[in-house]
Image (tube, grey):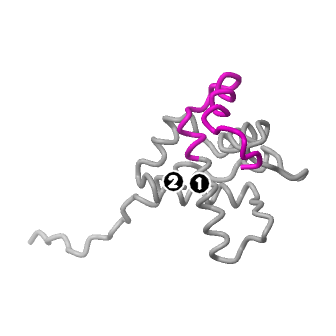
Amino acid sequence: MNDPSLDFNEVIRTIRKEDPRYARGAYYFLRQALDYSLKELHRRGELDDSNHLSGRQLLEGIRLYAISQYGPMARPVLEHWGIKECRDFGNIVFNLVECKVLGKTDQDSVEDFSGGYQFSKAFDQPFRPERIKPTIKKPRMT
């Protein structure tokens, strides 16, 4: 968080008065997904000391964190919170930026989150069973 004096619960209440599209849980989830993303990128040596993530990096971290936390229920949980596409994550991030909970660079934009991935592919496909060709031959009628 940029301003440690801010109470996150109070910030969410303030945001939701102005923009009620997303449930409280969406903001908590995003904050946890951001922490997860930072740790993973640092662990892999893919992030410098600035701790700044691009929209694409955060989207991938969100996807991985959601799957690790909610498994095949990730998409329904996100939808329950009002998150139906990647742009929604951007809206949440920039709501937090406006309240000075998160920072941004001059190059950062909510558009960075547009068109990131399709939710069905990102959250459903990893849990779909593979199609297996039958190995048993059909009996021949003689």
Is 69 left, or right, of 115 in this rendering?
left
Residue 72 coordinates in the image, percent (x, y): 41, 52
Residue 7 numbered mark, or none: none
User: Mark 1 packing: few (<14 Cα in 10 Å), some, or many (20+)?
Assistant: many
Label 2, on which residue?
Answer: 66
User: Mark 2 packing: few (<14 Cα in 10 Å), some, or many (20+)?
Assistant: many
Pick out the residue farthest to the right.
106
Q: Nearer the viewer, residue 29 or 54?
A: 29
Pick out the residue farthest to the top.
17
User: Against 12, is 130 above or below?
Assistant: below
User: Residue at image x 66%, y 69%?
Assistant: 41
Residue 89 quadrant: top right
Q: Nearer the viewer, residue 62 or 42?
A: 42
Residue 92 quadrant: top right
Secondary structure of residue under mark 1 = helix
Amino acid type shown at disc 1: Ala
Give the Cα distance between marks 2 and 1: 8 Å
Quadrant including the C terminus: bottom left
Residue 83 coordinates in the image, percent (x, y): 58, 39
Q: Nearer the viewer, residue 71 or 27?
A: 27
Which of discs 2 and 1 lies nearer the camera? The answer is 1
Residue 33 numbered mark, or none: 1
Pick out the residue farthest to the left.
142
Magenta residues?
1-29
The answer to whether the residues at label 2 and label 1 have Cβ atoms under 8 Å apart is yes
Secondary structure of residue under mark 2 = helix
